[in-house]
Amino acid sequence: AVAQVALDGVEFCRLVAGRIPPVEAAAGQEGDREAIRDVLFASASLSRL
């Protein structure tokens, strides 16, 4: 799967910190939507480590 995701630095930090859910992250997206979803959800799960 090929995909590109772009997030503002602050938005990414909020996502990783668990402050916003992945579905609300304002991401520039191109390519495989399922892969993008997986990356956003995996990033959000870092707050639980």
Image (cartoon, rainbow, N blue to C red):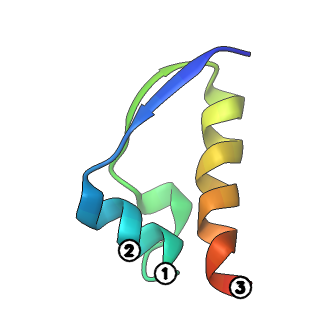
Q: Which residue is under mark 2?
A: 14
Check residue 44 in the rendering and tell me which mark sits there, or answer none.
Answer: none
Q: Nearer the viewer, residue 25 or 17?
A: 17
User: In the rendering, which numbered label is found on residue 48?
Assistant: 3
Q: Quadrant of the N terminus?
A: top right
Work out which quarter of the rendered image holds the C terminus and state it: bottom right
Q: Position of residue 12 (x, y in %)?
A: 38, 61
Secondary structure beneath disc 1? loop
- Please provide percent x and percent y for residue 2: 65, 14
The answer for how far apart the CA atoms under marks 1 and 3 are is 9 Å
Element type at marker 2?
helix
Measured as percent of width and height from the top left, residue 9 is found at 27, 58
Looking at the rendered structure, the kind of residue marked 2 is: Arg
Label 1–label 2 contact, CB within 8 A: yes
In the rendered structure, which amino acid carries the disc numbered 3? Arg
Q: Is residue 26 above or below residue 13?
A: above
Picture layout, residue 6 above or below residue 17: above
Q: Which residue is mark 1?
A: 17
Relative placement, left or right, of 2 versus 4 is right
Q: Is residue 48 above or below residue 9?
A: below
- Which residue shows up at 31% across the image and 63% down it? 11
What amino acid is found at the position of numbered circle 1 in the picture?
A: Ala
Q: Earlier in the sequence, mark 2 or mark 3?
A: 2
